[in-house]
Structures are given as structure tokens and as C-alpha cells.
Amino acid sequence: MSELSSLWAGISLLADWQVILMMVLGLIFGIITGAIPGFSTPLAISVMLPLTFGMESLPAIVFLTCIYAGGNFGSSISAILINIPGSPQAIVTGLDGYPMTCMGRGNEALGLAVAASAIGNLIGAIFLILIMPLLVKFALSFGPPELFLVGVIGLTVIASLHRSFLKAAIAGMFGVLLGTIGMTSAGSTRGTWGLYELLDGIPLIPALVGLIGFSELFVMLQRSYVAGKIEDGVAHSSKSLSKLLEGFRMTFRYPITLLRASTIGVLIGGLPGAGGTVASVVSYNEGRRWSKNASNFGKGEPEGVINAEAANNASEGGALALMLALGIPGGLATAVLIGGFMLQGLVPGPRLFLDNAPLLYGVMTAQVFASFMLLFFGLLVSFYAAKIISVPTSILIPMIALFSIVGTYAVKLLMFDIYIMLAFAVIGIILRKFDYPLIAVILGLILGPILDGQLMRTYQGAGELSFSIFLNRPLSVLLLGILLLSLLPLALRLGRDFRSRGWKKTNG
Amino acid sequence: MTWIAAFNRVKYELVVLLLIFSYATYYYLEVYALSSRTINLLLIGPVYVALALSTFFLIVLKVRKARSETEGAVSSDPSQQAPEESGKIGDSAVVRDGLVFGIATILYVLLLDKVGFVVSSFLYVMSLIYFLGNRSFWLTIFLPAVVVGFLYLTMVVLLKFPLPEGWLI
């Protein structure tokens, strides 16, 4: 009953014009920026993150989660129109979306993407509301050893982030070390270089904006247009509203596909680090396996677009559940969202649900409403998409730079944060240049303090640190099993690589 | 000679690796010197060792790969120049734009709390738009004025956020 009353309290919190306005603005901003290749959803959230500092908690968080929802759909626009996905999760959408555009059915593909995204998002949001209380009850039985193991499981994701395991590992461990800077619970000060501003650790938001956002601008400098100019014919055809609506209606002819893709999306989204890209790939493969038109996949099959879009949008519900219940970012976007929560003085994890249940239900219910809004604003933005994508970088870069700097300053009104942001921008540029996965550094930065704190508590609680501490707790044993399972693909991959290299070597 | 050529091919990559490793070593030694060493090294110790091992293996792999590529290039065509190594910065226009962007940003950040938000932001955006190749009045003057004005109104007037003030506004 208490959950029902919290749900009702959360819904009533949404009856505020500021919240509704923030939902609309977040969705539109997310869709527009998502449509710009390179302007990834995490970047869009990180640029707007500091601006939420002066807002109330609910409008601020709803704004950011709506950017997330909008960005997940928006990235499919450029994938469909010009075969350049706005974000990695839209790569699979382009497999059938772009061939549809080549066949003069680009607007239908956009309509399909809007409807599939909205339904995927809706199923993800419903899952989020239903599963959260159970997930939190489970999470509350976790002690420091279990929370440490959850952090380690989150860290194993790093292994799958890059084709070079060693580069991902180095980037992740570099992030972990950076994440442990500051004053510890034991009273020691580590790695602050005498700067009192670093006693609380490296400020996460300036680090995120610098590492992801500002470093991306240097990549953008190499292009005149983020996506290249769109041909007039495509731009013209994208204005065909009737075709857009035709695709929109067509989506509902595939209810089983929608349900299957959304379920896959939710489940995979709930795994740390897997995210929308993996969800859409798995869903697309499953869709092809079950489809009557399997041979048309990759040649402009509407079902292919639905499979990809429903899954990558539904993954948002799973990723949010993981982030809200356990405080683990499922991907880069949720990692930045954690920063948004922290900015409001809220720390994602089991306690958040107990202390702020109405607020969280408000955020989750807002996702349901956002799904319906996405239907309208998705169609609206798709209609004008071509113009947005062709904004020259010579205009875009100064604007993003200004917003990033001002936004970073606004977090604590400290110039020091801007210096940190610039320092991380330099690190980001160098790591990008040499092909290190930035998400590994971010995951390390976020998980570093969790791992360090929980390990210290485990040590302090037991008076020593031995493996038997973990083996004597049933939940820890379960988590160790999950940890081994999540390491298995990595071990197989490394073994396969080693065998193939050894074979090549012995065979000249 | 092939070893030297191999090191030369990946020298920038090795520099980055060694920079990361040097920072990690410095940090580890700093924590090691703390009085409560045991508890402070619970996580940092194993992470540092793992990072050191990963760095070592990556350096070995990079150099070995570069060596086999160098040998391959020499054996296939001795006159052929070694391909550009991965760390080389791009062409001159990109370097120029990058430098302009970097210097303008540093100047902006240094002047922000001395000159004031409105004037320094307007000059920053205007100069970037100009140097990145736009010459029209609307883009170089009008657009920055509108954006900075919008930010000022939103942040200072609406959200009551004090942005940096200096000699000017």
C-alpha cells in the first residue's frame, strides 16, 4: 500500500507546469541534439547538467531523463536519413532505415522509428515502476562486501568496451585511481596536491563535461558539418507528413515484434554497461530469426527498424532501474545522470528509494508521460530534421563551448571547476587521439569511490581482509558467481585471441 | 635497427602510456607514504599493480606489432616510407583551428572573472565564429549577442544565478 501511495504522490508531483515544461524542453532538446551525429546523448545531458543546479529536484531530474529519452530516439533520425547514427545505439537502426531512405521511404522509416521508440520507452517505463520496489528490497540486504562486489561487477563491463582489453583496462584503472582522490573516511588526504577544492574528490560534473563534451569539440573541428550537408531531395522528402504518418501507423501492425524487442531492451538495459547498443543488436538478431521476412533484413525491412528502435529505447527503463536501485551506471548516459542526481543532493542507490520515494515515482511516471509526448515531438522534429543536422560546426562549436563553460561554472560558482573541466578536456583529447575508451575512465571515476569506501568498510567491519569474508555470505557467493559469469566472455575472448595469435605465429 | 624504428613508430603512444603510468606511480607512492598505509592501499595497491602489468603488456604488444609492421614494410618495398604513426596530429588546418580554439578558450577562462561574463563571452563566441570561417555580420555579431543575452537573462535574471562579474559586466 505504501508503494501505491508513494506512486500516487509521485504522480501528483507531476501536476506542476514547471515539470511539464521541463519534460517538453528536455524531450525536444534530446531529440534535436540526438539527431546531430557526435552530439551523443551523454554529451547532451552533460551540457545541460549544470543548468539544472538552480532548479527544484523533480523538474531538474525529469528534464535530464527526458533528454535521455529524446536522445535515444533522436539518434535514429540521422541514421535513417544519412546513414550516420547520432549515437552508437542507432547503428542498427540505419541497417534498414537508410536503405528505406534510398528507396524513397525515409519518412516511413522515421515514422516507424518514432512509434517504435515511444512504445519501447513506454514498456521500459512501466517495467521501471513495477520492478523498482522489488529491486530496492533486494539491494537493501546488501552489506559492504556485496556492494563492493556489485562495484566490481560494474567494473568488469570495462572489458567489453573496447576491442583492446588492455587499453580499456588501463583507462578504467586510471579512472579508478582518479576517483579515489580526496579525503577518505579514515581521515587521510590522497592526491589533492594541496588543493582544498579536491578534498571531496574530483568534481564529477566538470570532469564529465570536459572528458566527454569539450574533448568532442576538438573532434568536431575536423569537420565542416557534423553530418555533412543533406541533399535537397532528402530534405524535401522528409517534409512529407503523410509518409511519416504512414510509417507511424505501420508500426502497430507488428505487436509481437514490439513486445519482444522491448522486453529484450529492458533486460539488456538492466545489465551494467550493456546499454542501448547491445540491446538493439541482440533485438535485431532475434527479430531476424523470428521474422517471416528475414531475407529482407538489411535491405529496408520495416521490422528491422522496429526491432532496433524499440529495444534501444526500452533499454532506458532497465538502465534507469539499475542506476536508481543500485547506483550503478548502465552506460555513459546513466553515468552522467548520476551526476544530475548528485547535483540535487541525491545519491542513487537503495537509500534514495526509501528517503525520496514520491520523487522517484514522479521521475518514473514522468517517463510514461514522456513516451506519449515522444509520439508528438518525435514526429515534429523528424519533420524538420534535415535543417538541424546541417548546422555548420563553425557555429555549433562556439555555442557548445560557451554552454559547457558557463554550465560548469554554475554548478558551484567556482572558477576552479572550469579549470578541472579544461584539464579533463585535455585528458579526453589525448585519450581519444590514442583510442582509449572514455567511458572506461568515467566508470572508474564513478565506481572508484564506491569500491574504495566499501572495501574500507568491509576491512573495518571484519578487522582484516580475506576472501573468506565473501565466501561466508550467501549474497556475496551469488554475486561472485555473477562476477565469474560476466568474466567468462572476456576469458573466452582473450583465449580465442591468444590461440589465433599463437596459431598464426607457429604457422608463419 | 628495426627495434629503434619500431619504437619510433609508436613513440607518441608510448609517451601517453608512460604519462598515465607515471601519474599512477606518483599517486601510489604518495599513498604509500601515508601513516595509515594498509587501509589506504586496500584498493589503490591492487589497482596500481594491475595498471602497471597492463601498461607493460601493452607496451610489449605495441612495440612487437610495430616491429613486425616495420619489417613487413621494409621487406615488401625498401624505398617505402614508414606509414604515419598513430599519434600524429592531423593536417595543418585542423591544427590551426585547434590552436585557435584552445588559445581562445584559455584566454576566455582567464578573463571571465576579470572582465565579466557578458563582455568576455560575447568576445569569445564572436572570435571563434570569425576564426572558424564565418564572416557575415549576422553570424559574427548578432548571433553571439543573442546567445549571450539569452544566457544572461536565463541565468542571472530568471534563475538568479550570479555569473562572473569583473571590470565590466
Image: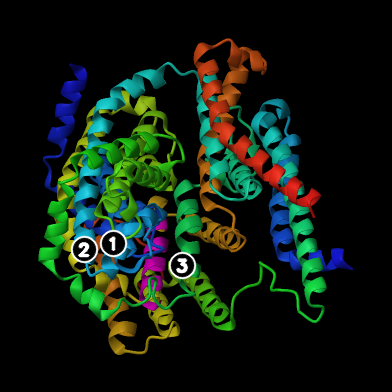
Instruction: Give me the residue at 32% from left, 89% from top.
Output: B136
Viewport quadrant of the N terminus of chain A: top left
| Distance Cα–Cα, label 2 vs label 1 | 7 Å
On whether disc 3 and disc 1 are found on a single subunit, the reply is yes
The magenta stretch spans residue A399: yes
Kind of residue at badge 1? Ile
> Closer to the N terminus: mark 3 or mark 2?
3
Q: Which residue is mark 3?
A: A217
On whether disc 2 and disc 1 are found on a single subunit, the reply is yes
The magenta stretch spans residue B153: no
Instruction: Give me the residue at 52% from left, 39% from top.
Output: A157
Report the disc number at residue A77: 1
Nearest the eye: A303 or A417: A303
Mark 2 residue crowding within 10 angstroms, few (<14) / some (14–19) / many (20+): many
Horizontally, is B66 left or right of A380 in the view? right
Judged by depth in the image, the label closer to the viewer, 3 or 1, is 1
Q: Is residue A161 visible?
A: yes
Horizontally, is A387 left or right of A179 in the view? left
Please state the horizontal and vertical placement of residue A504, each as a whole percent of the image: 74, 51
Please state the horizontal and vertical placement of residue B28, each as a whole percent of the image: 72, 40
Mark 2, secondary structure of its residue:
helix
State whether residue A14 is above or below residue B136. Answer: above
Horizontally, is B81 left or right of A160 in the view? right
- The reply to whether discs 2 and 1 touch (Cβ–Cβ < 8 Å) is yes
| Distance Cα–Cα, label 3 vs label 1 | 21 Å
Q: Which residue is mark 2?
A: A382
Hey, which quadrant is residue A369 in on the image? top left
Q: Which residues are magenta?
A: A394-408
Instruction: Give me the residue at 66% from left, 72% from top.
Output: B88
- The reply to whether discs 3 and 1 touch (Cβ–Cβ < 8 Å) is no
Judged by depth in the image, the label closer to the viewer, 3 or 2, is 2
